[in-house]
Amino acid sequence: MKKLFYAAVLSFLSLTSCKFNNAETAKLPIYGNKQTETKTVNGKQVTDTIYQTIPAFKFVNQYGDTITDKSLDGKIYVADFFFTSCPNICPVMHRNMLPVYNEFKNNADFRIISHTIDPKYDTVPVLKKYADKLGVTGNTWWFLLGDKDQTYGIAKNYLVSVPGRTPDGQYVHDGYFILIDKQKRIRGTYLGTDEKEVEKMITDIKTLMAEPDQKSS
Amino acid sequence: MKIKLIGAICILVIVTIISCQDNGQIEYNRYFSSGNAVYQEHCQNCHGVKGEGLQGLIPPLTDSVFMKKNGQRLACFLNSGLKEKITVGGKEFEGEMPASGLSPVEIAEVLTYVTNSFGNNQGTVTVEKVNADLAKCN
């Protein structure tokens, strides 16, 4: 009888501890190319996984400030690609991004960056006006302007493509939101035109913020 | 005999009236449901599922006073786009709406949908009206 009791307690404990562990270690996957690197540390072979990260960049935001990869050190951020005169998917994307902005605008460790793919038309004042009309203030959401080659180049690092203009002069691009962690690794991609996926992104951002190596320093 | 004849005429008149009304209703329904499809494909991305627009960037379609006042010009806006500053729901909008590329029939359908949704209630916009409106565009 006593044995049975101990067995019951033990199994109960292990069950609850499993559950506890799961909650504690809820983690988002890490996307992108992986490489393994084997080093010798103190005479032992240690294998590290090196994940793809977003490389250095330099752009200008809607206030005319220079924004580099350093400006996003210690930040979790979401990136997307758009242009202000876009008549098709961009209004949907930014209608869906607004709840993300409102949810995290008071969090100093969070940013949204929207790269324009039409730098000829989307000058700093045009981007500022766009931000104002969208109701975006402060430094949570930056609209970034840069050299076209650089913008298209960095898009590849975010695993999205911006193939260029169609015959009738429209730009074609996919409407993904990409979630980047404090180590500049890709932790999620979400279809920005789909309200449900954006809701999931908000949940994922909260999960990410709770990961031990993402907490505020 | 006379009474029967009068009765028959009365019934004929009533049936005609009812069927005419039905024709009107059928026409409205046809315009409205086709217009809904046109709206989803050509307008909804910017103006939203509920015609709510987008903040200060894209005007909502919920201002019935604007819709009534610009009744004739709505077809022109769709046909050739809109660049001028407009005031909708007490807010100024100055962006540019591109020309829709829709045919007069599609313009009539989508205008029937929009001017009878989102709090608007203006009845059928026929293709004849659209053609007449388009002839008066600047």
Image: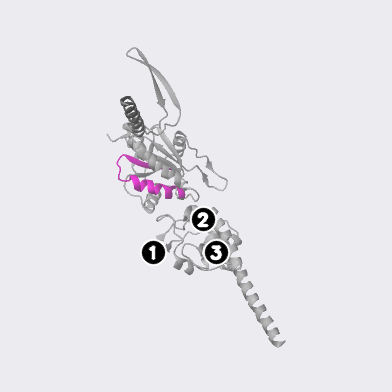
| Residue ID for mark 3 | B112
Amino acid identity at mark 3: Thr
Callout 1: helix, strand or loop? Answer: loop
- In the image shown, does B108 or B138 lie closer to the viewer? B108
In this rendering, is residue A5 above or below B8?
Answer: above
N-term-proximal mark, 1 vs 2: 2
**Residue B89 appears at what percent x and percent y?**
41, 63
Q: Quadrant of the N terminus of chain B?
A: bottom right
Give the residue type at disc 1.
Gly
Q: Identify the residue at image location x=60%, y=69%.
A: B24
Q: Is residue A19 visible?
A: yes
| Element under disc 2 | loop
Disc ID at residue B43: 2
Q: Nearer the viewer, residue A215 or B26?
A: B26
Which residue extends farthest bottom?
B2
Question: Mark 1 — residue?
Answer: B90
What subunit carries mark 3?
B
Residue B28, position as x, y percentages in the image: 58, 66
User: Does residue A95 show up magenta in the picture?
Assistant: yes
Q: Is residue A120 something one can see in this rendering?
A: no
Question: Which callout, 3 or 1, points to the residue nearer the camera?
Answer: 3
Q: Horizontal placement of B132 versus A41: left or right?
A: right
Chain for disc number 1 = B
